[in-house]
Image: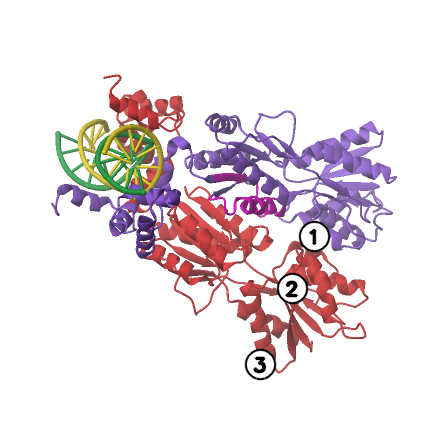
Chain colours: A red, B purple, C green, D yellow
Amino acid sequence: MSTSPLRKTRSARRGLGRATLADVARAAGVTAITVSRYLREPQRVSLQTAQRIAQALSATGYVPNKQAGALASAGSGASRMVAALIPNIANSIFAETVQGLADALQGSGCELLLGSTDYSVEREEAQLRALMGWFPSAIVVTGRRHTDAARALLQQARARGTPVIEIWDQHAASDGFTQIGFDHAAVGRAMAAHLIERGHHRLAYLDSGVAEDFRAHERGEGFLAQARHQRVAARRLAAPRTGDAMQSGREALALLLDAAGGPAFGAVACANDHLACGVLLGAQAVGLVVPREIALLGFGDFAFGRQLEPALSTVQVPRHEIGQAAGRALLAALDGQTVADQRLPWTLLPRSST
Amino acid sequence: MSTSPLRKTRSARRGLGRATLADVARAAGVTAITVSRYLREPQRVSLQTAQRIAQALSATGYVPNKQAGALASAGSGASRMVAALIPNIANSIFAETVQGLADALQGSGCELLLGSTDYSVEREEAQLRALMGWFPSAIVVTGRRHTDAARALLQQARARGTPVIEIWDQHAASDGFTQIGFDHAAVGRAMAAHLIERGHHRLAYLDSGVAEDFRAHERGEGFLAQARHQRVAARRLAAPRTGDAMQSGREALALLLDAAGGPAFGAVACANDHLACGVLLGAQAVGLVVPREIALLGFGDFAFGRQLEPALSTVQVPRHEIGQAAGRALLAALDGQTVADQRLPWTLLPRSST
DNA sequence: TTGAAAGCGCTAACAG
DNA sequence: CTGTTAGCGCTTTCAA
């Protein structure tokens, strides 16, 4: 019996020497299912066995194989993996969101499977396709723009009961996925209204140079709409795309000056604080007085804007909260609760630059 | 036969209606293994069958189940998942490293499983334990300090052939895991040497307020050692721990002033650029002239330091490259190549603040 | 070039 | 409270 063909075949395919449930069971003098139960519902095992199992567990250094677990419970849909797709992890705005998501997931038994799309919906689709193979228990994507194929994948997943959450966006015209974010056009309107209220004319929106940064463009559209509404002249300009957004802002200054080197606009709202700080420092370097000669408004409330002189007026956004809320929502959904869209609050922070 | 008990039992446990290899095979009039082959080695399948399979594939919308695949190939050790453990994703230094890692992994068929440890070795251990359950093909951890249990887990993994890479560190006294980073004490020494060379006396190292930021402390030790070596007075101070490092630098200014409000130190090297910028702006706000009255040196070369006036002298570090190199190294290791430690270059960038 | 059989490590379902 | 049996969806091995 010790050299039965079964045994031989078995060992030929064994994973490299890691203890399995069966090994632990043998050491504890029970069967695998009892150990499995002990691991998941310790109360359902007698105290005696529990102790023996506990001992066997540490003696063998057992690490449960989650692929096997997920496969076996495929019906109950529980890989407990959360797939998150983010445009760029190095972008501090998304980095904090990912951290928020990780924080919310901490201790929930869920793991984070992360993909970066580089602001491309095509790459998002490719990543999504790859991540789907793990059958994540929940999916978090950034924004509401996807390729048709990606949308189809997301819809299929949702149809199977997998929660799908779109973060950073909040828009009526959506596909019905849970949205956690805010309305960027509304922010743009508020930015224009603020500048107008402060008495500025000749407005400009300095848009992100990243063509696929849809949310920045939407803020721009809101900005222009509001200016039009209040009958104030406003233009949209795109910042040059460089690797460094602050430098990009600095270089964009040229677009904001008239032929004589004076300010061509009275106030400039920027797609983000990096851009705004670049413009602010560039403007000061050529002797323009902020906000008297040119007012500057940012977006994002990054740490450095607060420290400048004049301090940068900006829009504070719930960077970390969006991730955290997404994490909590998805955990609730996995728990069987229904989750609603969440419109998270943002605040226009008037400081000294407007 | 159509109502055989086998069939009934089968359907009772089926995952929620997703197409399997068997479904595709049925549609193509072949068996599952042929489809599996087509997916992995298309040349080994006849052109005719290949076409039929391709059609069946798209007709069914098949998504391969990676848990099943990984389980079946457990011996060949191929989940093609990379587990990465990072102190804090929101910290821009690590965010860029993660992005570098994601970039390197792009197109390799590897997925990124990310954990954040919040600078705690205990949390690192817990995360590691959880991630190990997925049997990642490679493991990336930050730094060389781990709990004993975590170290044991990593050693076990390595013994099973899983590459383990420690990033951001490069130190002789290690556990033999592949290290990709640099020697932080050497950076600290260079920082002191630079300040001394510029003729500064009464040096200070403003350390990170994060107790577990070992690398910042090591730079501090190198700094003090070098100052001692050159017989220049130097002290180490810890910045107050606040949520915002720049603000923390600003508040740390008080520690750097003497009773009369003048500078108590001639030059201050900071654990990072955030701190340094905070000090710089704070110093200017109280009328101190940088670098004449107090010289400031940062670490990290973040975008804003470059834009300030005076521009911040700093140490440029390969944030993105470390992640990228780790990704490439682990891919090479998975490919069977042996990988060596990598000491990545850093540069002291003298600008105007020293 | 294709297939049959067996098994990866775990858990659901049903007994006892 | 514990065990038996079957099966998750895929790939390895061996055979044709």
Report if residue B91 lies within the magenta region.
yes
**Quadrant position of the N terminus of chain A in the picture:** top left
- Percent from the top left, x then y, of residue B282? 76, 51
Q: Nearer the viewer, residue B130 or B316?
A: B316
Report if residue A116 lies within the magenta region.
no
- Percent from the top left, x then y, of residue B139? 51, 35
On what subunit does the disc labeled 1 rest?
B
Q: Nearer the viewer, residue C12 or B182?
A: B182
- Amino acid type assigned to the residue bearing label 2 in the image: Gly
The magenta segment is B82-109
Q: Which mark is residue A229?
A: 3
- Amino acid type assigned to the residue bearing label 3 in the image: His
**Quadrant position of the C terminus of chain A in the picture:** bottom right
Q: Residue B266 sits in which quadrant?
A: top right
Secondary structure state at the residue bearing disc 1: helix
Secondary structure state at the residue bearing disc 3: helix
Q: Nearer the viewer, mark 1 or mark 2?
A: 1
Horizontal arrangement in the rendering, residue B1 relative to residue A55 (left or right): left
- Percent from the top left, x then y, of residue A175? 40, 65
Quote the CA–CA distance across marks 1 and 2: 16 Å
On what subunit does the disc labeled 3 rest?
A
Secondary structure state at the residue bearing disc 2: loop
Circles 2 and 3: CB distance less than 8 Å?
A: no
Q: Earlier in the sequence, mark 2 or mark 3?
A: 3
Q: Residue A233 sits in which quadrant?
A: bottom right
**Mark 1 Cα shell of 10 Å, populated few (<14), some (14-19), many (≥20):** some
Q: What residue would you read off at disc 2?
A: A298
x 76%, y 45%: residue: B254
